[in-house]
Image (cartoon, helix red, strand yellow):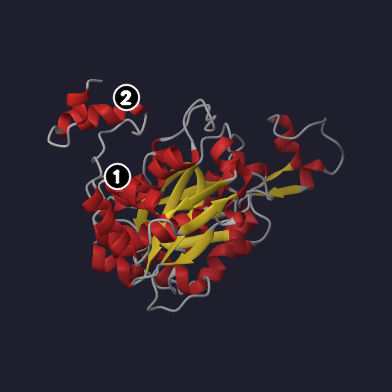
Amino acid sequence: MSAEATDPRDAAGLIEFYYEKGWSDGLPVVPPSEDSVGAMLAAGGVQGDEVVGVVSARNTRVTADKVAINAVMAGCLPEYMPVVLSAVRGLTDPRFAYHGIATSTGGASVVIIVNGPITRQLGINGEDNAFGPGFRPNVTIGRALRLLMMNAINTRPGKLDRSTLGNPGKISFCFAENEAGSPWEPLHVERGLKPEQSATTLFAADGVYQTYNQLSATPEPLLYGMADAIANLGARAIVGQPDAVIVFGAEHVKVLRDNGWSKQQVKQCLFEHARQSVAELKKAGRLPGGIEPGDEQAWQHVVKEPEDFIVVCAGGRVGNWSACLSGWGSRQGSRAVTTPVEVS
């Protein structure tokens, strides 16, 4: 790359320069400047050398300037910085077990679920196309976290990142809970914060399995289908995971609301039916050994207890769709982490 290509007046050249340096996720990045990075730091209320988090397994200190640089590169506006910082604090929380999700062949994505007033202030989408494109805060906040993982922690494909297949959510996966459309308390309140606070919840997901049910007018059949989807014999989930996220679309929420079901009832029903027998797991090669007496009546549940299901509402007002996001790792693996958004 010639010296001229790094001239700040040459935006196209700078973008190519960042590609050549390996600082991109495969998409063009916004070249940062002293002013744009400074604006990010100011919006986040942090100093550049402030340590935001530590990944002890990688002996890496993540400083605020690295977060700000990658947020600019991802296309974030400065006002997104408090949400990005919250997500980084969750990412570096020991309970999230960063090293495991980063190095696994499973290719887990980092899902950011945003709650609280900040979702409305920034326009973080939790309705139509909640998991998809078209909304700057969703895409750029999620992308900022992935760029930081690559550029500050060296989580690059073929190096620290050893994913066999990966998944598109590894580029960006951020959405808001549709609190207004939910019959239950918001996720961040359930996890100990106040309604007026904002928060991010990070979850390491193997993938998204959309479920469809247009006939059920009562909760049980609807939840049976979802339980079967997340407990299929080919899923990593069935041999044990710390958490699982269940996202209900509006039409399925209506079924649950109209029948007066609490979130706890939903979790209990999912827990009871999201399982496979030890015999079936052995037949499918998911557990070792031959089938023994009692294996047909011995059950392997997707999660250890009902509270390990994380239940949220999101998506459009029409369509009989919901989704299961299975968690990464064994029951000693990554746990979902909820972190307040600190607005300066």
Tell which of 141 and 114 is nearer to you. Answer: 141
Q: Dividing the picture into quarters, in which one does residue 342 lie?
A: bottom left
Q: Residue furthest left?
A: 9
Image side of residue 288 versus residue 2, left or right? right
Residue 122, above or below 333: below
Q: Quadrant of the N terminus?
A: top left
Image side of residue 100 versus residue 172, left or right? right
What distance separates the C-alpha of mark 2 from that of mark 1? 17 Å
Sort mark 1 into few (<14), some (14-19) or many (20+) by Cα contacts within 10 Å. many
Q: Amino acid at mark 1?
A: Ala
The secondary structure type at the circle numbered 2 is: helix
Q: Residue at x 28, y 33 (%)?
A: 27
Q: Amino acid at mark 2?
A: Glu
Task: Name the residue carrying label 2.
Answer: 20
Q: Residue at x 80, y 42 (%)?
A: 295
The secondary structure type at the circle numbered 1 is: helix
Tell which of 91 and 322 is nearer to you. Answer: 91
Tell which of 93 and 40 is nearer to you. Answer: 40
Residue 152, above or below 315: above
Which mark, by number, is residue 115? none
Picture coordinates of residue 116, whole percent (x, y): 36, 71
Picture coordinates of residue 246, whole percent (x, y): 48, 55
Tell which of 148 and 292 is nearer to you. Answer: 148
Task: Name the residue carrying label 1.
Answer: 74
Sort mark 2 into few (<14), some (14-19) or many (20+) by Cα contacts within 10 Å. few
Residue 7, above or below 200: above
Q: Residue at x 41, y 44 (%)?
A: 148
Q: Earlier in the sequence, mark 2 or mark 1?
A: 2
Residue 315, above or below 209: below
Residue 208, visible in the rendered structure: yes
Q: Quadrant of the C terminus?
A: bottom left
Q: Nearer the viewer, mark 2 or mark 1?
A: 2
